Image (spheres, rainbow, N blue to C red):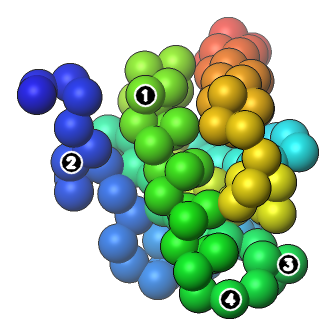
Amino acid sequence: MGDRTFPRSERLTNANDFQAVFRGGRRVERPSVLILWREGQGPRKVGFAVSRQIQGAVGRNRARRRVREAYRVSRQALPEGVQVVIVARAPAMGGPYREILRDMREALATVAKRCRQATEA
């Protein structure tokens, strides 16, 4: 398993951590996901949320699972020390998984690029 798992140590688990990212984070928007992020210390951490546009618990849970899996296979693009909240949007519930994966990879690459630019400046 090793690198394929998504350990608890990489998750945002505290409501205060989520709120800190929501309040002070920068945004990257794609059709199926909205990524809010901020630079921090320590390992990269991620939390997941679902847009209120998705009605019903079944739909929200499905969207969350699909977005979480897309993040899990794409997370190596994200540098250490970044805190991220990924918000699943309506297309994440029923759209093709490859589009969610493409959106996730593009968004994480954008976050990584902006982090590199901030450290170089």
How far apart in space, not on screen, are marks 1 and 3 (Cα)?
26 Å
Front residue (pair 62, 78): 62
Task: Determine if residue 111 is in view.
Answer: no
Quarter the N terminus occupies:
top left
Q: Earlier in the sequence, mark 1 or mark 2?
A: 2
> For residue 7, which numbered disc appears in the image?
2
Residue at 53%, 73% in the rendered image: 61
> Dot 3: what SS?
loop
Mark 4 or mark 2, earlier in chain: 2
Mark 1 → mark 2, Cα distance in angstroms: 13 Å
Residue type, label 1 = Val
* 1 or 3: tag closer to the N-terminus: 3
- Identity of the residue drawn at 11% across and 26% down: 2
Q: Classify mark 4: helix, strand or loop.
A: loop
Task: Measure the alpha-carbon separation of dots 4 and 3.
Answer: 10 Å
Q: Which residue is mark 3?
A: 53
Which tag, 4 or 1, sits closer to the chain's start? 4
Residue highlighted by disc 4: 56
Check disc 2: other Cα within 10 Å, few if <14, some if 14-19, many if 20+: few
Q: Nearer the viewer, residue 80 or 93?
A: 93
Marks 4 and 1, how far apart in space? Answer: 27 Å
| Distance of label 4 from label 2 (alpha carbons) | 28 Å
Front residue of 111/104: it is: 104
Specify the amino acid type for callout 4.
Answer: Gly
Q: Which residue is mark 1?
A: 73
